[in-house]
Amino acid sequence: MSRCVIIGGAPINEYGRIRSYLRAGDFIIYCDSGLKHREGLKAKPDLIVGDFDSYDRGQLGGIEIDKESGTARDTEGDEVIELCPVKDDTDTGHAVSVAVERGFKDFLLIGMTGRRMDHTLGNLYILHRLDELGSKALMVDDYSEMSIVNREPVYIDDSLPFFSLINITGTAEGIDIENAKYPLRNASIVQTHNDLGVSNEVLEGQVAKISVARGKLLLIRDFEG
């Protein structure tokens, strides 16, 4: 099955960098004001989700319901799910739920981090949510890549050498880091004291191995040190 790309409304400045992560065959979901990135990303939506409190619904043109399928589409034929502004999830959270219901297991999340710290933190926990569902997910912004290290070891090369490991879920134990400036062996990182995992570096020409026996960690790979 193809990968699902979910695009939120947080700022994107490095469009060229973000576009490099897109692949032919991706299923593209724009969330509300994420549509402002459509031109910069040069990616046509397969689905638009939102309550349109931060994007002018009129820019979609008229939305019509297909009589046979019951699917709502805008004037360009893009599928639209219009949400009520008063709801129990965010537009992005709802888009994730829809994608999971449709069977997607591989995700790229962009436009997720920025000035709104509440939305940023909520979106970071989407990585945790998808991991709990057994899905693969990568979040990318102008500055870094973010993913979850959990059951399987993760290998990272020195193409992006600077990395940190942050605990966002409680206690992670049995942490091993090999081929890095600051190796670890059978270490623990707790959510209230993350200093041990911050600011590490893959040794030049090496591939670092990160493994966690119990718990999970947020892996952040910085584009610049």
Image (spheres, rainbow, N blue to C red):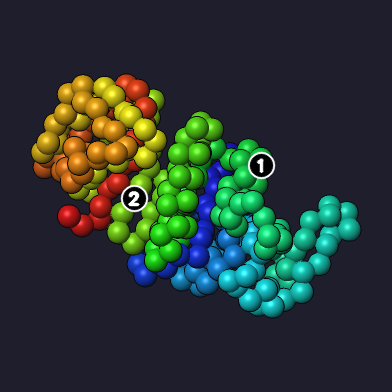
Of the numbered discs in the image, which one, if any, rests on residue 32? none
Q: Is residue 183 toward the left or the right of residue 20 in the image?
A: left
Residue 15 in view, yes or no: no
- Residue 1 is drawn in which quadrant? top right
Between 54 and 96, the one lying in front of the other is 54
Residue 26, image x and y in percent? 54, 51
Q: Residue at x 21, y 26 (%)?
A: 187
Asked if marks 1 and 2 touch (Cβ < 8 Å), the reply is no
Tag 1: residue type?
Answer: Arg
Residue 43, image x and y in percent? 53, 63
Residue at disc 2, secondary structure:
strand
Identify the residue position indicated by label 1 in the image: 102
Between 213 and 173, the one lying in front of the other is 173
Q: Residue at x 64, y 51 (%)?
A: 88
Residue 36 in view, yes or no: yes
Marks 1/2: CA distance? 25 Å
Of the numbered discs in the image, which one, if any, rests on residue 145? 2
Q: Residue at x 24, y 43 (%)?
A: 164
Q: Is residue 122 toward the left or the right of residue 209 in the image?
A: right
Residue 56, image x and y in percent? 63, 76
